[in-house]
Image (cartoon, grey):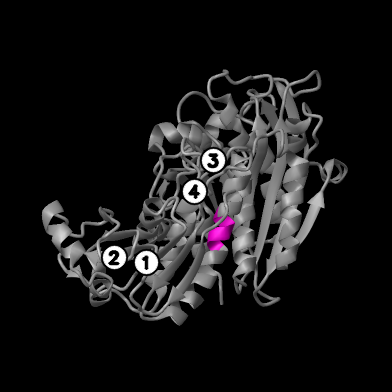
């Protein structure tokens, strides 16, 4: 990924060089701190000419303002300061990063009238700057050319605030989560020839440096456990399969863990039920669930979360050769339940079936949440601004929805029920892996529910939000890292003690 900008928090002082961004509250004009950066009232005069009122996200840019020695003097509309929440501050940070592209040194005056002065806003602003500054440029050999829209100098950004110590402390925890998001983005953006199951495992092993316990199960061990569903997906690829188990023990020994399970199909051809060529290159991102779980474990360990957390990801490549699974094959899952594979492109649920059963059986978690780029049907239902939420526990569903609202990684609850469950009954096995044309996201969730035992469980279908989602103020990346901030908030609010 691109190099992150260097961010520091400082007390108020009139900048003498570089570029200066002053936050301007809607209807309030420049703050006292902002006015100190504009002794000639240049921004005040320019705002009248440009009819600039401080509306959120609007930028007023004055180049080489006379008499100040600055390269640029910029007013950034912050909207109504008293209405700014954490995500609002992050969005402002994203606009700052976009405005300062190719700028080596800058100062941001972050104090606003009527806004909280505890440093949390400045910290969220910084988090937004880092998230927006991300670009996946590892394979670009001509970085920094004018024609390269992704290129930018990381720069040094000083954020002026009335509470720099508070901002620095708050940002330390936020930076851990941001790094988890960036890790997830990197994993999703990597091409499949570089990131297969074995290479993914090597990325996961690095979490041990943060204190995460990492355990890797190979095919021999999974076969011994009876994971016929997961291994059936992998049998067409020479690259092998792995089940990665990550454990962060930040809580008390007696505390039950919360568990997160991720689908990790590093490339999905569809198998013998092959996908059409259109968009198949996007299937390098079919491991977005596993990427989110890995990024989440990084975030929790890096910020020393006071909770016991388990992450389990099933890593396979769904390829085509003479040994690949065929439509009509019947496999036996770790649970002992048999599955008739009518469509080899409905493979993610097979991977998750064994991963979920293994997780529930071994760890007896207080709750288990899986993430998967599972169905195109969820995108038909919800588009790309919400992920689908399926849940067997109303309290857990409420917690997840609230976390989604606060982080803006939004969820929409979808139904489950016996009428849908009947659609995956098979005349030849205990179940089939597809349920017909209608309600495809629901029948996929019903399939997964058969492997969770009595565990409070939620399934997040992130097919529309983990890759190729619409750009936002804090993400211009094809791989979004969706789920890391959402689930970190869930853990922080409900599982840390």
Asked which secondary structure carries label 1, the reply is strand
Asked which secondary structure carries label 3, the reply is helix
CB within 8 Å, label 2 to label 1: yes
* Mark 1 neighbour density, 10 Å: few (under 14) some (14–19) many (20 or more): many
Mark 3 or mark 1: name the one nearer the start of the chain. 1
Mark 2 or mark 1: name the one nearer the start of the chain. 2
Q: Which residue is mark 1?
A: 108
> How far separated are the C-alphas under marks 2 and 4?
22 Å
Mark 2 or mark 4: name the one nearer the start of the chain. 2
Q: Can residue 266 be seen here?
A: yes
Q: Quadrant of residue 496?
A: bottom right
Residue 144 on image: x %, y %: 53, 43
Q: Which residue is mark 2?
A: 23
CB within 8 Å, label 2 to label 4: no
Residue 35 in the image: above or below residue 358: below
* Mark 3 neighbour density, 10 Å: few (under 14) some (14–19) many (20 or more): many
Q: Which residue is mark 4?
A: 152
* Magenta residues (range): 177-181
Q: Quadrant of residue 434?
A: top right
Residue 329 in the image: above or below residue 52: above
Residue 434 in the image: above or below residue 224: above
Residue 366 on image: x %, y %: 61, 64
Residue 22 on image: x %, y %: 29, 65
Q: Residue at x 81, y 42 (%)?
A: 226
């Amino acid at each position: 990924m691109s190099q992150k900008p260097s961010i520091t928090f400082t007390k108020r002082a009139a900048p003498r060089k570089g570029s200066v961004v002053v936050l301007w509250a809607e209807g309030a004009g420049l703050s006292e701190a902002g006015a100190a950066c504009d002794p000639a009232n240049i921004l005040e005069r320019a705002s009248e000419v440009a009819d600039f009122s401080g509306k959120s996200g609007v930028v007023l840019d004055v180049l080489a303002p006379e008499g100040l020695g600055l390269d640029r003097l910029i007013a950034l509309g912050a909207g109504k300061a008293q209405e700014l929440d954490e995500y609002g501050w992050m969005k402002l940070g994203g606009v700052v990063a976009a405005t300062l592209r190719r700028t080596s040194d800058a100062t941001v005056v972050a104090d606003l009238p009527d806004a909280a002065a505890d440093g949390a806003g400045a910290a969220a602003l910084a988090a937004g700057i880092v998230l927006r500054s991300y670009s996946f440029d590892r394979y670009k050999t001509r970085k920094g050319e004018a024609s390269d829209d992704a290129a930018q100098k990381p720069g040094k950004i000083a954020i002026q605030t009335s509470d720099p110590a508070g901002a620095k402390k708050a940002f330390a925890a936020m930076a851990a989560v941001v790094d988890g998001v960036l890790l997830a983005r990197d994993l999703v953006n990597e091409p499949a020839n570089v990131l297969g199951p074995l290479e993914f495992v090597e990325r996961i092993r690095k979490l041990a440096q943060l204190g995460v316990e990492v355990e890797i199960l190979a095919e021999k061990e999974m076969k011994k456990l009876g994971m016929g569903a997961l291994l059936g997906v992998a049998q067409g690829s020479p690259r092998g399969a792995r089940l990665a188990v990550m454990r962060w023990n930040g809580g008390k020994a007696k505390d039950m863990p919360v568990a997160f399970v991720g689908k990790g199909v590093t490339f999905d051809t569809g198998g013998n039920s092959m996908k059409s060529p259109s968009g198949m290159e996007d299937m390098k991102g079919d491991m977005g669930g596993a990427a989110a779980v890995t990024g989440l474990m990084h975030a929790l360990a890096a910020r020393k979360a006071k909770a016991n957390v388990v992450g389990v990801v099933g890593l396979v490549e769904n390829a085509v050769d003479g040994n690949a699974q065929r439509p009509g094959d019947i496999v036996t899952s770790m649970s002992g339940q048999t599955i008739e594979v009518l469509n080899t492109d409905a493979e993610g649920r097979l991977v998750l079936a064994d991963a979920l059963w293994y997780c529930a059986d071994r760890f007896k978690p207080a709750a288990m949440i899986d993430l998967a780029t599972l169905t195109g049907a969820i995108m038909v239902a919800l588009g790309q601004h919400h992920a689908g939420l399926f849940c067997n526990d109303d309290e857990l569903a409420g917690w997840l929805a609230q976390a989604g609202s606060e982080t803006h990684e939004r969820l929409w609850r979808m139904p489950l029920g016996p009428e849908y469950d009947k659609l995956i009954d098979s005349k030849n096995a205990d179940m089939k892996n597809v349920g017909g044309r209608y309600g495809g996201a629901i029948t996929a969730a019903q399939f997964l529910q058969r492997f969770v035992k009595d565990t409070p469980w939620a399934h997040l279908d992130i097919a529309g939000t983990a890759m190729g989602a619409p750009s936002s103020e804090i993400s211009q990346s094809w791989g979004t890292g969706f789920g890391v901030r959402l689930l970190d908030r869930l853990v922080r609010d409900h599982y840390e003690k």
